[in-house]
Amino acid sequence: RQVEKDGNIYRELVSSNNGALDRSGLEKATFVTLVRNSDLYGLIPSIKSVEDRFNHKYGYDWVFLNDEPFTEEFINVTSALVTGETKYGFIEKKDWDFPPWIDQNRAAGTRDRMGKEGIIYGNSISYRFMCRYESGLFYRHPIFNDYEWYWRVEPDVKLHCDVNYDVFKFMRENNKKYGFTISIKEYSATIETLWDATLSFLEKHPEHVNKNCMLDFISDDGGSSYNLCHFWSNFEIASLDLWRSDAYRDYFDFLDQWGGFFYERWGDAPVHSIAASLFLDRDEIHHFGDFGYFHVPFHQCPVDDETRLSLKCDCNPNEDFTWHSYSCTTKYYTVNQLRKPSNWLDHAT
Ligand code: GDP
Ligand code: MN
């Protein structure tokens, strides 16, 4: 296989898989996966599922990002599975590190304490680098320069249903900027001051709040407190321009200065979700209710029989999380006055 190196981007030159596809009508869009070499064999079923359910009909590209150089094995196996072009980006050390203003003793103290308290990933440094990178840095990688849209895929996920339309075209034509499948409440112990930080930011930058924003999804008291609802960001179909906006750049930089990625354990999911809910018009946020999706331990499985059967979903609607009481998706439908599936209450356990 021929691989070309251009700065921090390796590009697979021989794409043998897309010969029969006309890719001329595609959006400027790509899949993106942040991943370690050691995750390869958990990742390939994810890729195969996305290819079989969607991408073999379209041929979108796939960007892989890593804080270490990808192995030849990783490049060979993934490029054989993807219908579009595959690109391999290397994350520079400065983007996968502590910013210079972080107090190392304080950060280590948090990791110690959270580790002892049994908070998931509480003592991990790399998980914090990952959350910070996914929050505010991935879209600045030059590998995205020619793209406007992305679909995030992780290892060990699955698409349960066929996707028979171009989702990126759907996003553009319907003026959507952020699309999700599962929503859920965050562990409050990981984001103790995230809402305080957000309120301080909004005092400095009230101009960034959208007049028709979806504050009522993330707060039950008009903004005094955060209700912990967030879109589960292991799945995202979104506009890169959302994160490239002045509003988001200001917000991320403010949060980064605050230090909560290291003094607490802020996840990219609540950070993205709060930003989307404040800076976008509520109509720009979309729930892909017709998608079947799995990331351990939750499924989204369309409970409406007609949708599920016509899309050949291979999931059990009784395992659907969407309408479960721990999910925030019911709230999303309520605050936006959207119509829920007729039998949603049967699944609202
Ligand atoms: P969880 O879903 O919150 O349990 O976290 P994951 O372990 O799935 O990590 C989220 C994403 O970041 C996945 O796509 C991982 O492959 C990726 N990831 C996590 N840690 C690292 C890391 O240290 N290096 C790299 N390159 N990717 C990572
Ligand atoms: Mn994951």
Image (spheres, helix red, strand yellow):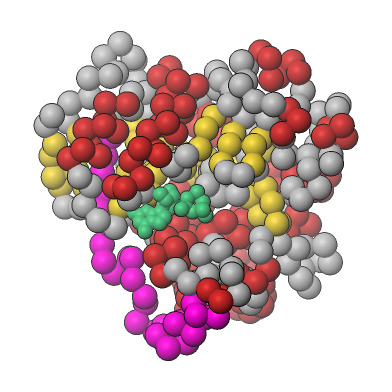
Identify which residue is drawn at 76% across, 50% down.
326
Position of 227 with respect to 166 (left or right) is: right
Position of 98 with respect to 7 (left or right) is: right
Position of 345 with respect to 162 (left or right) is: right
Q: Is residue 335 above or below residue 185?
A: above
Q: Is residue 260 above or below residue 277?
A: below
**Residue in front for this viewpoint, 114 or 24:** 114
- Expressed as whole percent of the image width and height from the top left, the position of residue 101 reads 39, 84
**Residue in front for this viewpoint, 60 or 293:** 293
- Expressed as whole percent of the image width and height from the top left, the position of residue 348 reads 84, 39
Position of 245 with respect to 139 (left or right) is: right
Q: Quadrant of the N terminus?
A: top left
Identify which residue is drawn at 50% across, 37% down.
157
Identify which residue is drawn at 53% across, 43% down.
236
Q: Which residues are magenta?
A: 86-113
- Is residue 196 at least partly visible in the picture? yes
Q: Is residue 219 above or below residue 338?
A: below
Whether residue 281 is in magenta: the answer is: no
Q: Quadrant of the C terminus?
A: top right
Q: How many numbered callouts?
A: 0
In terms of image quadrants, where is residue 99? bottom left
Identify which residue is drawn at 38% across, 49% down.
34
Which residue is the extreme one toward the top? Answer: 20
- Expressed as whole percent of the image width and height from the top left, the position of residue 94 reads 29, 69
- Is residue 58 at least partly visible in the picture? no
- Expressed as whole percent of the image width and height from the top left, the position of residue 69 reads 21, 52
